[in-house]
């Protein structure tokens, strides 16, 4: 019971902070400040143990009975952090110490780029959802490789499950996309627990066109080739997955799944943000229209994400890995995805609304 009381107190404190401070700030500004604070706190000696104590998170170096072997790595929790929060790999170890089983950094591109004009991040508070049109703002693959190399030099970093999500540079023509992805994969595969190919963000012009089988094949083949070269040097596999959009028709989802199998991918991540604006949204339609373009994330994606999971599992069989992403908030949500065939589950939006104790709470609930 004391743990439950402490957990409630932590949630209450974060709820108050979110309502009275963070929710009044520009979402991107709040994001930057939060990551900066987390990074500074984690740099204090003994902070990793303190993080786990404060969030009641288990030591990731120990197997607590819920650890699962996926993509060649042991995950202390099936819930991981989706790409987008830590684009430049600045604090994956701190995020892992909050209770995530894995952290996916990125999306990173071959060339550094500023992303789309601001404002580009918006909250739908009544729906506990987000809309973003960030546009792959990041410091580039070379900078991320340097940060991950530093992290991997530590004992903790060597054990950490860190996926790397790569996308196409905005200035690269679609016909040159394969070589753009190859460049990033060549730099980053050696530091990645797995590589995720992002062809599904709605915020880079033309990117989603790459989900068509004819355009997607050379990209997948290029990244798989670089991953295999890295595997030879590292003497371990570097699994490759592709992340797809929830807006694909079912037949296109099946086609991508078939191509992934043909090319030798380890699996699929489903799904990215959606360009849809469901009628079920509680936020005033005028507000949504003023926000404009961007990818919607959060609970409104849950139903489609679950549909895609079941479709992919039926298409891919039991051997391929499926990471289910979109609309996950509670431990029951995670359990539903696992029961429906997911090997791992990812969240992002709930982390913003639920706070830093969220991943630890999910991990504890699943262990119970």
Image (cartoon, rainbow, N blue to C red):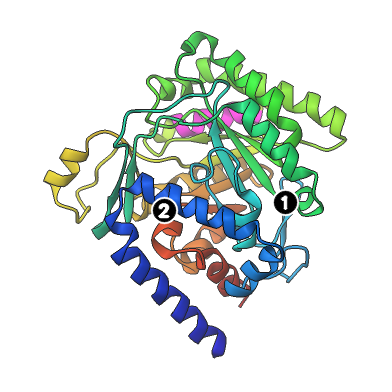
Quadrant for the N terminus, please.
bottom right
Residue 101 appears in the rendering: no
- Binning the other alpha carbons within 10 Å of mark 1 as few (below 14), some (14 to 19) or many (20 upward) gives many
* 133 w.r.t. 37: above or below: above
Residue at 42 percent across and 64 percent down: it is: 354
Q: As rendered, which of 325 and 113 lies closer to the eye? A: 113
Residue 173 in view of the camera? yes
Q: Secondary structure at mark 2?
A: helix
Q: Is residue 187 above or below residue 284?
A: above
Outermost residue to the bottom: 1
Residue 18: % across, % down: 35, 64
Q: Write the start and end of the magenta stretch as one range.
A: 252-261
Residue at 50% across, 66% down:
358
Secondary structure state at the residue bearing disc 1: loop
Side of 210 where 228 appears, left or right = right
Q: Earlier in the sequence, mark 1 or mark 2?
A: 1
Residue 289 image position (x, y, % from top left) = 16, 39
Q: Which mark is residue 160?
A: 1
User: CB atoms at circles 1 and 2 under 8 Å apart?
Assistant: no
Q: Residue at x 52, y 49 (%)?
A: 324
Q: Pointer 2: residues within 10 angstroms few (<14), some, or many (20+)?
A: many
The image position of residue 115, as x and y in percent, is 41, 28
Relative to residue 44, is residue 2 depicted above or below?
Answer: below
Q: Is residue 133 magenta?
A: no
- Identified at 36% across, 35% down, the residue is 247
**Quarter-wise, where is residue 179 in the image?**
top right
Q: CA distance from mark 1 to mark 2?
A: 22 Å
Q: Which residue is mark 2?
A: 349
- Left or right, 227 with respect to 23, comes to right
Asked whether 216 or 294 is in front, the reply is 294
Residue 18 numbered tag: none
């Amino acid at each position: 019971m004391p743990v439950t009381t402490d957990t409630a107190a932590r949630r209450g404190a974060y709820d108050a902070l979110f309502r009275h401070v963070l929710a009044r700030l520009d979402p991107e500004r709040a994001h930057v400040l939060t990551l900066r604070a987390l990074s500074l706190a984690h740099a204090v000696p003994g902070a990793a143990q303190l993080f786990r104590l404060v969030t009641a998170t288990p030591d990731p170096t120990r197997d607590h009975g819920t650890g699962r072997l996926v993509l060649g790595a042991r995950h202390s929790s099936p819930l991981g952090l989706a790409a987008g929060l830590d684009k430049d790999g600045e604090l994956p170890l701190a995020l892992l110490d909050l209770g995530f089983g894995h952290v996916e950094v990125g999306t990173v591109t071959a060339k550094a780029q500023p992303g789309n004009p601001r404002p580009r991040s918006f909250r739908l508070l009544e729906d506990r959802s987000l809309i973003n049109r960030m546009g792959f703002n990041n410091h580039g693959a070379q900078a991320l490789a340097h940060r991950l190399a530093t992290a991997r030099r530590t004992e903790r970093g060597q054990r950490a499950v860190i996926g790397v999500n790569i996308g196409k540079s905005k200035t690269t023509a679609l016909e040159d996309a394969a070589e753009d992805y190859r460049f990033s994969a060549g730099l980053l595969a050696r530091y990645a627990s797995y590589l995720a190919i992002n062809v599904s963000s709605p915020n880079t012009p033309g990117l989603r066109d790459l989900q068509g089988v004819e355009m997607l094949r050379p990209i997948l083949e290029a990244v798989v080739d670089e991953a295999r070269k890295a595997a030879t040097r590292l003497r371990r596999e570097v699994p490759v997955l592709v992340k797809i959009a929830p807006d694909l028709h079912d037949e296109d989802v099946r086609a991508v799944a078939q191509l992934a199998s043909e090319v030798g991918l380890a699996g699929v991540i489903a799904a990215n943000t959606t360009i849809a604006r469901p009628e079920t949204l509680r936020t005033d339609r005028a507000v949504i229209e003023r926000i404009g373009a961007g990818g919607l994330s959060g609970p409104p994606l849950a139903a489609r994400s679950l549909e895609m999971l079941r479709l992919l599992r039926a298409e891919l069989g039991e051997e391929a890995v499926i990471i289910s992403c979109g609309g996950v908030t509670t431990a029951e949500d995670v359990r539903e995805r696992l029961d429906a065939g997911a090997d791992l589950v990812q969240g992002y939006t709930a982390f913003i609304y639920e706070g830093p104790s969220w991943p630890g709470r999910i991990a504890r609930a699943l262990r119970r």
